[in-house]
Every structure is written in C-alpha cells, then in structure tokens.
Image (cartoon, rainbow, N blue to C red):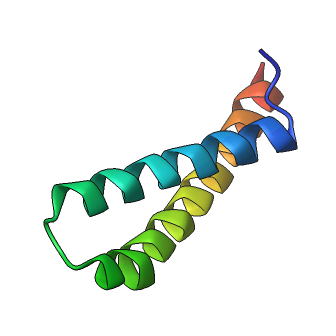
Amino acid sequence: MEFNLPTTAGALIALVVLGTGVLIAAGVMATSTVLMMVTPAMLVFGVICLALGVKHGEYRVGRS
C-alpha cells in the first residue's frame, strides 16, 4: 500500500472521526466539549505526529 497524501489524510481523518464517535457514544463528557475541544486537539496531535514520522522516515532513508 502506497501512502500518498490522500490516503494518509483519509486515514488520519478516519481515526479522528472514529475517536470522536466513540467519545460521544460513551457519554464520558458533553458532546459540545468533545466537538469543540477534544476533536481539534486530536487533529493537531495527529498532524504533529504525522510530520515527525515523515521526517524520521526521511532521516532513516537518507542514512541507508
């Protein structure tokens, strides 16, 4: 499987949507809190982790 931009973005968004849905269904906190605070934080954290992972992959390939 080749991870190009659409595939990677789709996987990230699918994970965030799944996590948001589970949090809303579990009823741990108010839906407004999940949608206004938790979901954007998950997106930002996911993008940061993705960027670090890409840079680490580039570093590993460059050292080979």
Name the quadrant of the C terminus. top right
The image quarter containing residue 53 is top right
Name the quadrant of the N terminus. top right
Front residue of this view, candidates 44 and 35: 35
* Residue at 78% over, 35% down: 7
* Residue at 50% over, 54% down: 16
Of all residues, the one furthest to the top in this rendering is 1
The image quarter containing residue 48 is bottom right
The number of discs equals 0
The image quarter containing residue 54 is top right
* Residue at 55% over, 70% down: 44
Image coordinates of residue 42 in percent, x first then y, are 45, 64
Front residue of this view, candidates 63 and 18: 18
Image coordinates of residue 43 in percent, x first then y, are 54, 65
Image coordinates of residue 35 in percent, x first then y, are 42, 77
Left of 42 or right of it: where is 61? right
Left of 44 or right of it: where is 9? right
* Residue at 34% over, 84% down: 32
Left of 13 or right of it: where is 17? left
Q: Is residue 58 above or below residue 13?
A: above
